[in-house]
Image: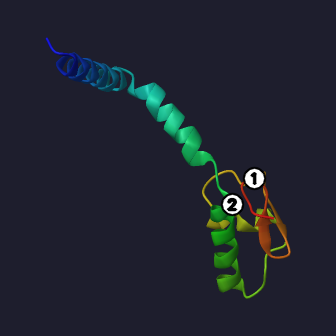
């Protein structure tokens, strides 16, 4: 057996093993995906601010006002000068 054949066989074995693990344990994968999906980003908050302004004609003063515009946790963010401030936001 050549070295390239051994490397290819090893890569296929590892790939099949990984796919099999996910197929056998979907609940763990789904739980991890839900945690990531529930986390909002700075861009999410910025988009919610724009939606709020378009619908109300004024800038929001608190992230609590954005509840109808965002699905996820935005409690780590605040609004400063009409822009989102918090994790991942450019100063």
Q: Residue at x 75, y 52 (%)?
A: 87
Q: Which residue is mark 2?
A: 42
Looking at the image, residue 38 sits to the left or right of residue 56; the answer is left
Residue 7 lies, with reference to residue 31, above or below; the image says: above
Q: Which residue is mark 1?
A: 87
Q: Residue at x 76, y 66 (%)?
A: 84
Q: CA distance from mark 1 to mark 2?
A: 7 Å
Residue 33 pos. (x, y %)? 50, 39
Residue 35 pos. (x, y %)? 58, 39
Q: Residue furthest top?
A: 1
Looking at the image, residue 8 sits to the left or right of residue 73; the answer is left
Please report whichever mark, 1 or 2, sits nearer to the chain's N-terminal start. Answer: 2
Q: Quadrant of residue 4?
A: top left
Residue 18 pos. (x, y %)? 34, 23
Kindly check if marks 1 and 2 are in contact, taking CB atoms under 8 A apart as contact. Answer: yes
Give SS at disc 1.
loop
Q: Quadrant of residue 26?
A: top left
Q: Quadrant of the C terminus?
A: bottom right
Give SS at disc 2.
helix
């Amino acid at each position: 057996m050549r070295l390239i054949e051994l490397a290819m066989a090893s890569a296929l074995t590892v790939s099949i093993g990984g796919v099999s693990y996910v197929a056998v344990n979907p609940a763990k994968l789904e739980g991890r995906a839900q945690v990531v999906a529930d986390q909002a980003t700075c861009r999410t908050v910025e988009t919610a601010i724009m939606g709020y302004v378009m619908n109300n004609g004024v800038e929001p003063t608190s992230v609590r006002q954005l509840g109808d515009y965002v699905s996820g946790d935005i409690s780590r963010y605040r609004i400063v000068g009409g822009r989102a401030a918090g994790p991942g936001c450019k100063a």
